[in-house]
Image (cartoon, grey):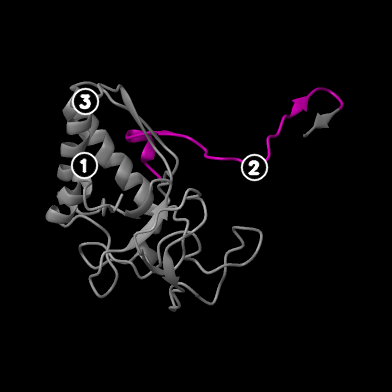
Amino acid sequence: MAYNDYGTYLRGMKEDVFLKHQNDDIFMGQVWPGPVYFPDFLNPKTTEWWTHEIRRFHEKVPFDGMWIDMNEIANFCSGTCSWNGTIYPDNTNCYLQCTPAHSKYDDPPFMLNHTGTYQPLNYRTAPMTVKHHDGNIQYNTHSLFGISESKATHIAMTAVRKKRPFVLSRSTFLGSGQYTAHWTGDVKTAHIVCLNKYTVYGT
């Protein structure tokens, strides 16, 4: 959460571990906690910071595993956003002040029908021009966010608990099974398939 009294955020700012816009402003989005900054898990420094934060939390609550969610990156807002400091009770709708992101990366010649309608690639995620510590942009790295967070979490949990960790991730990629189990997320339709010699039923 991007709140000035939140220690994890303050230490992350000090270590410079968050994703940024092209002008080097930190990219702000909104998820369940409210306004958030997103760790750059492709930055080696971020794993150190992440491990430190997990250790601090584990000292207070000795948990056994971690479930990392919304890590596609999911973002309730689209575009370049700022926050006026007001908290709203319904965090599933974007309440940040946002301007649409229009770039050749957000609006490529091809479009994806991933919501039932054709939307820019930055719809409810990070703009495709948001960059990592080495200058790579989301357009080229978007599918790697989940696996890079899973790897950092696996490393951190191993260091903190000194045993094989349990990590559950919603976003995965090739090779993710080395670091995490896979949760399929919120499926809108439940399907029950019954197979016998004559019939296939779906509900």
Residue 69: image quadrant is top left
Kind of residue at disc 3: Lys
Q: Position of residue 185 (x, y in %)?
A: 52, 39
Quick check: can you spot residue 141?
no
* Residue at screen point 19% across, 44% down: 7
Q: Tag 1 or tag 2, which sits nearer the N-term?
A: 1
Judging from the image, what secondary structure is the residue with disc 2 in?
Answer: loop
Kind of residue at disc 2: Lys
Residue wearing tag 3:
60
Q: Which residues are magenta?
A: 174-198
How far separated are the C-alphas under marks 3 and 1? 16 Å
Q: Tag 2 or tag 3, which sits nearer the N-term?
A: 3
Pointer 3: residues within 10 angstroms few (<14), some, or many (20+)? few
Residue at the far left in the pictured view? 14
Q: Which mark, by number, is residue 188?
A: 2
Q: Position of residue 20 (x, y in %)?
A: 27, 65
Pointer 2: residues within 10 angstroms few (<14), some, or many (20+)? few
